Image (cartoon, rainbow, N blue to C red):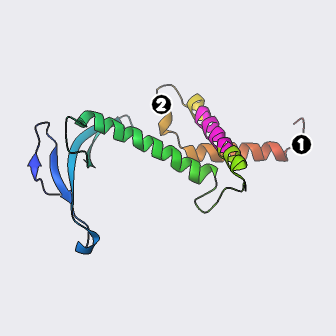
Amino acid sequence: MAILEVLDDGTYLSELRPPRKRDGPPIRVRVIEYTVLTTDADGEQVCELFRLATTLLDPAQAPAAESAALYHDRWQAETGIGELKTEIRGGPEVVLRSKTPAIVAQEFWAMLGVYQAVRHLIGRAAPPGLDPNRISFTRTIDAARDSVTRATLSPRGT
């Protein structure tokens, strides 16, 4: 990505070009480079470089640090929506069974309730010092399903 102009806050302007000219003109973007320091499973610190391209070109309107933080929050929300669609609903090909708006809303609220319950379970199960976001949602919901299936199949009182 070519740097067209470096701005006062250290971000820079560039252009995103479509693969073919007929797909439209280039889009001017502001690129915000930032690093994220994390700790891996072995306790080693890892520094990773990210580049965020945004059409918010004015640094006063969208400060770099604030944009980077919001982008992280956005991906957490996207992850939650993805977990809801693929893990709880049963996959992208599965549609809601309900036929009326009121029952669609009820089914959707039920899925949100299950999502919240699984997230709560993850938060409670996370060992001290481990970020609950590092625990797999997929594995947790699979374990919960297995637990419910075993409880359903076992004779009462055992």
Part of the protein shown in magenta: 109-121
Residue sitting at x 15%, y 46%:
12
Which amino acid type is marked by label 2?
A: Leu
> Residue 67 appears at what percent x and percent y?
29, 38
Residue 19, visible in the rendered structure: yes
Residue at the far front in the pictured view = 101
Indicate the secondary structure of the residue bearing disc 2. Answer: loop
Instruction: Decide which of 62, 1 is in the foreground and name it.
Output: 62
**Magenta stretch: includes residue 115:** yes
SS majority, magenta: helix
Residue 155 — which label?
1
Instruction: Decide which of 37, 17 is in the foreground and name it.
Output: 17
Lower sequence index among marks 2 and 1: 2
Residue at the far top in the pictured view = 128
> Residue 88 appears at what percent x and percent y?
63, 49
Which amino acid type is marked by label 1?
A: Pro
Residue sitting at x 10%, y 37%:
8
Instruction: Decide which of 45, 11 is in the foreground and name it.
Output: 11
Q: Quick one: quadrant of the C terminus?
A: top right
Q: Quick one: quadrant of the N terminus?
A: bottom left
Residue sitting at x 25%, y 37%:
62
